[in-house]
Image (cartoon, helix red, strand yellow):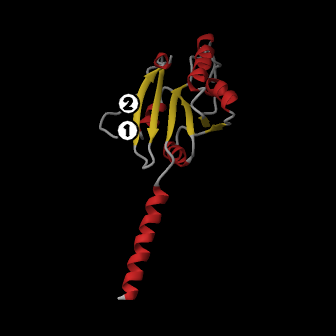
């Protein structure tokens, strides 16, 4: 009987340790499309409107304690998040748009708030990983730059997605 009690105690302790290890630190992940770009070349810079939007993004996220920034390796995406990087001190890390599964896993493991910048034809895939219902976001139109997707993850890994626009953050 004594050994049986010890075995039960060990099983209960292991279950508690497993439950504790699966909790994660609550965080917010902001997912945005790069700002407006010039209409020249394969890897264009930001337009004047895009540069202004990049500054606005920096102002919006200034108090959000961004710890990590992920960007594709293009001039326009890096320029979109440079202001946030300069103010937060977070380094800009490159990611591959063809490997969303890996990026989502990385986002869930990282501690602290995160900013991800991508493209009109990729960010909806990333956002849809965090949706808990049947409605999914569609690819952004080429002229849509105004959306900020705010993904809130709780300590159990449950997520809530909000689609906002820049002026929602006055």
Tell me what residue is drawn at x 45 percent, y 37 percent. Answer: 152
Q: Position of residue 81 (x, y in %)?
A: 62, 27
Residue 37 falls in image quadrant: top right
How many angstroms separate mark 2 from mark 1 (CA)?
Answer: 9 Å
Q: Position of residue 2 (x, y in %)?
A: 39, 87
In this rendering, is residue 132 above or below 62?
below
Q: Is residue 112 left or right of residue 17?
A: right
In this rendering, is residue 77 above or below 12?
above
Q: Which SS class for mark 1?
A: loop
* 33 vs 157, nearest the viewer: 157
Q: Which SS class for mark 2?
A: loop
Taking the image as drawn, is residue 69 in sight? no
Residue contact at pointers 2 and 1, CB within 8 angstroms: yes
Q: Position of residue 162 (x, y in %)?
A: 41, 29
Tell me what residue is drawn at x 54 percent, y 30 percent. Answer: 118
Q: Which residue reaches farthest top?
A: 48
Which residue is denoted by mark 2 in the rendering?
A: 137
Query: Which is more foreground, mark 2 or mark 1?
Result: 1
Number of numbered labels in the structure image: 2
Which residue is denoted by mark 1 in the rendering?
A: 131
Q: Position of residue 42 (x, y in %)?
A: 62, 23
Q: Which residue reaches farthest left?
A: 134
Tell me what residue is drawn at x 48 percent, y 46 percent. Answer: 101
Number of residues whose C-alpha sits closer than 10 Å to that of mark 1, classed few (under 14), some (14–19) or many (20 or more): some
* 135 vs 111, nearest the viewer: 111
Q: Counting residues from the N terminus, which is met first, the one under dot 2 or under dot 1?
A: 1
């Amino acid at each position: 009987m004594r050994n049986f009690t010890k075995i039960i105690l060990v099983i209960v302790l292991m279950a508690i340790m497993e439950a504790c290890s699966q909790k994660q630190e609550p965080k917010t992940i902001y997912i945005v499309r790069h700002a407006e770009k010039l209409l020249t070349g394969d890897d264009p810079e930001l337009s004047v409107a895009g540069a202004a939007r990049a500054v606005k993004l920096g102002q919006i996220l200034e108090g959000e304690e961004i710890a990590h920034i992920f960007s594709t390796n293009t001039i326009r995406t890096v320029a979109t998040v440079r202001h946030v990087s300069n103010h937060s001190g977070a380094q800009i890390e490159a990611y591959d748009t063809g490997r969303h599964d890996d990026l989502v896993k990385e986002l869930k493991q990282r501690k602290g708030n995160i900013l991800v910048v991508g493209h009109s034809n990729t960010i909806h895939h990333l956002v849809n990983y965090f949706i808990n219902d049947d409605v999914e976001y569609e690819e952004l139109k080429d002229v849509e730059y105004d959306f900020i997707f705010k993904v809130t993850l709780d300590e159990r890994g449950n997520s809530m997605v909000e689609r906002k626009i820049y002026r929602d953050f006055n």
